[in-house]
Amino acid sequence: MNCIFCKIAKKEIKSYLIYEDDISIAFLDINPLSRGHILFVPKKHYKTLSEIPDGELAELMKSLKRVLNIVEEKLSKNYNIINNCGKIAGQEIEHVHIHIVPRYGGEEIFLWKTHKLTEEEAEDILKRLK
C-alpha cells in the first residue's frame, strides 16, 4: 500500500510523534493551520469514519480523548476537531484522519460562508434523510 499515513504508522516515514497506542497514532501536521496542529490517525487503513467497525471506532474515540487531554493540558483548552470525508469535502489523503487544531486567539483559519435555511430546503433535506 502506498498510503503515507500507513507508512507513518509503520514507522517507515519520520513523523513528529505526539501519541501512540495499539490502534492509533498522533503526530504534528507538517502543514499546520496553527501552532501544535496534530493529525490523529487509526493505524488500520480506512477511507472514512463510517467504514470503521463500531467497536473499533469506540476505542479510537477513547484514544482521541487521550490526545485531546494532552492538547488541553499542554497547549490550549480551545481547539477545532476536523474530519474531512471525500475529495469534495477536502480530504486529500484517503486514510481517515482527524485534525486537532489548537486555537490561541487571533487566528484567521476558517472562512464559513453560511446562508439562511429556507422552509423548502429544510423540508427537502428532511425528506431525503428520513
Image (cartoon, rainbow, N blue to C red):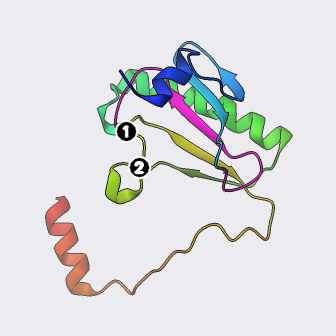
Q: Mark 1 points at which residue?
A: 94
Cα distance in 3D space between marks 1 and 2: 7 Å
Residue 28 forms part of the magenta stretch: no
Kindly state the secondary structure of the residue where label 2 is placed.
loop
- Left or right of residue 123: residue 55: right
In the rendered structure, are the residues bearing label 1 and label 2 in contact, judged by CB atoms less than 8 Å apart?
yes
> What residue do we see at 80% from left, 66% from top?
105
Amino acid on which disc 2 is placed: Gln
Q: Give the number of marks.
A: 2
Q: Does the stretch in magenta take in 34?
A: yes
Residue 44 position by quadrant: top left
Q: Looking at the picture, does residue 93 appear above or below residue 113? A: above
The structure residue drawn at horizontal position 57% and vertical position 45%, both measured from the top left corner, is: 99
Q: What stretch is highlighted in magenta?
A: 32-47
Q: Position of residue 60 (x, y in %)?
A: 51, 27
67 horizontally vs 50: left or right: right
Neighbor class of circle 2 (other Cα within 10 Å; few <14, some 14-19, many 20+) is: some
Question: What residue is drawn where x is 64% and y is 42%?
Answer: 29
In-front residue for pair 90/72: 90
* Front residue (pair 33, 55): 33
- Name the quarter where the C terminus is drawn: bottom left
> Percent position (x, y) of residue 9?
54, 20
The residue positioned 52% from the left and 31% from the top of the image is 41
Q: Mainly helix, strand or loop, the magenta region?
A: loop
| Residue 56 % position (x, y) | 42, 22
Residue type, label 1: Glu
Left or right relative to 107: residue 95:
left
On screen, 94 above or below 31?
above
Which residue is at the far right? Answer: 74
Would you call the spot at circle 1 few (<14 residues within 10 Å), some (14-19), or many (20 or more)? Answer: some
- Please name the residue that numbered disc 2 is placed on: 91
Between 57 and 45, the one lying in front of the other is 45
